[in-house]
Image (cartoon, grey):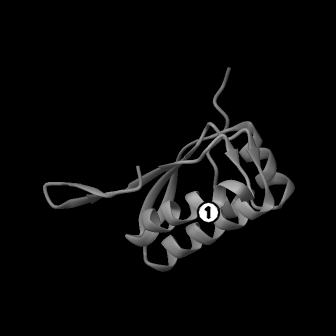
């Protein structure tokens, strides 16, 4: 994922699935994919598989959302794990990241 497609000339948001271990060690591979996804202004991130996350990854997600917004687009979420939502809440980034609500059991 991470590449854009189009349907009849209409750009489709690029998508990136976040890894289960979304911490500093994964960011060298993840950061370029996130930046590429938001370069067109619209992207979809899927954080439903995230089991581990740290502050560095959260900062990267915020920076990517801000970059997308600055170019007139945004980031939509295909899903977010409880771990990702909890980290966003603890760091005061819940509103900034606008993660989707948890799915009912």
27 is higher (above) or lower (below) than 105:
below
* 85 left or right of 29 in image: right
Q: Please, which residue is most extreme toward the right here?
A: 90
Find disc 1 in the rendering and name its residue: 28
Q: Please, which residue is most extreme toward the top here?
A: 105
When asked about the image quadrant of residue 88, the answer is: bottom right
Look at 15% across and 61% down and name the residue there: 9
Look at 42% across and 71% down and name the residue there: 39
Residue 92: give x, y in percent of width and height.
82, 61
* 55 left or right of 14 in image: right
Look at 79% across and 61% down and name the residue there: 55
Q: Which of 33 and 14 is in front in this view?
A: 33
16 is higher (above) or lower (below) than 64:
above
Residue 78: give x, y in percent of width and height.
51, 43
When asked about the image quadrant of residue 26, the answer is: bottom right
Whether residue 73 appears in this view of the structure is no
């Amino acid at each position: 994922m991470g590449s854009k497609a189009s349907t009849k000339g209409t750009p489709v948001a690029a998508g990136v699935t976040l890894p289960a271990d979304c911490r500093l060690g994964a960011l060298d591979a993840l950061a370029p994919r996130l930046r590429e996804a938001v370069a067109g202004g619209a992207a979809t991130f899927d954080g439903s598989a995230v089991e581990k996350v740290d502050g560095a990854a959260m900062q990267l997600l915020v920076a990517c959302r801000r970059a997308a917004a600055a170019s007139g687009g945004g980031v939509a979420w295909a899903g977010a794990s409880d771990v990702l939502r909890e980290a966003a809440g603890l760091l005061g980034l819940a509103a900034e990241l606008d993660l989707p609500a948890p799915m009912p059991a």
